[in-house]
Amino acid sequence: MSAPDSLPPDLRPRLEAGLDALSLEPALAVPLLDYLALLVRWNRTYNLTAIRDPGEMLVKHLLDSLAMHPYVDALAARGGELADLGTGPGLPGIPLAIAKPGLKVALVESNGKKARFLREAVRKLDLAPRVRVLEARIEAVAEPGAFDAITARALATLPLILELGGHLLGPDGRLLAMKGADPVEEIAALPDGWTVHARHRLAVPGLAAERHLVVVARAPGSG
């Protein structure tokens, strides 16, 4: 089976190689390319992402999102729920949901046209009810303590992410923040009651730029 007709034919082998480098099944290329084809098509009209080249999207959207996949394995294994804050066109939430069938994902996005795309993607990719779309500002999501983890990709500083979305985390919840360079200054500015649980350097196939995952949790004794 080749890539969808709307995509360059070389994308499938490139994606399969990237998945292999990330220790993911090459068969995931099929649903991931279906998602990418939908994103490319909608992007022509709705400008959902500034990146327009499908090959660049493959690396900077799909593989970049999937680089953090080992760190949601335990969550997916127990059927936990991840809130993807300011998800835009579904990044990293949709690629992670495709790669981890046990994972529940809430896609939080206040922009109407992006939320419409997300609903169409969830429908076309048959991700419901495991994946849901919350069309709302992050701070307005009225599900306090409902999530095992929250994530954000290129959204805001660590303190601001926690200010907007920290209320969504359960007592043992984690923020899985996707960052470029190691955000030393942001970590130093974490608000009281929060602490860095772990930092992981990520390798994105085909991308030379730095990538890190910062895991933030409530500090012991902070409630």
Image: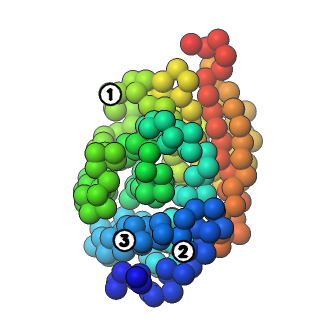
Looking at the rendered structure, the kind of residue marked 3 is: Asp
Discs 1/2, front: 2
Q: Earlier in the sequence, mark 1 or mark 2?
A: 2
Q: Give the Cα distance between marks 1 and 2.
A: 37 Å
Indicate left or right for 141 with 149 as reference.
Answer: left
Q: Give the Cα distance between marks 2 and 3.
A: 12 Å
Numbered tag placed on residue 72 in the rendering = none
83 or 157: nearer the viewer: 83
Mark 3 lies on residue: 34
Q: Earlier in the sequence, mark 2 or mark 3?
A: 2
Mark 1 lies on residue: 142
Task: Tell me the crowding category of disc 2: few under 14, some 14 to 19, or many 20 or more residues within 10 angstroms, Cα based.
Answer: many
The residue lying at 48 percent from left, 36 percent from top is 78
Quarter of the image with the C terminus in it: top right
Quarter of the image with the N terminus in it: bottom left
In the picture as drawn, the residue positioned furthest to the bottom comes out as: 9
59 or 125: nearer the viewer: 125
Discs 3/1, front: 3
Is any atom of residue 50 visible in this view? Answer: no
Mark 2 lies on residue: 15
| Helix, strand or loop at mark 3 | helix
Asked if marks 2 and 3 touch (Cβ < 8 Å), the reply is: no
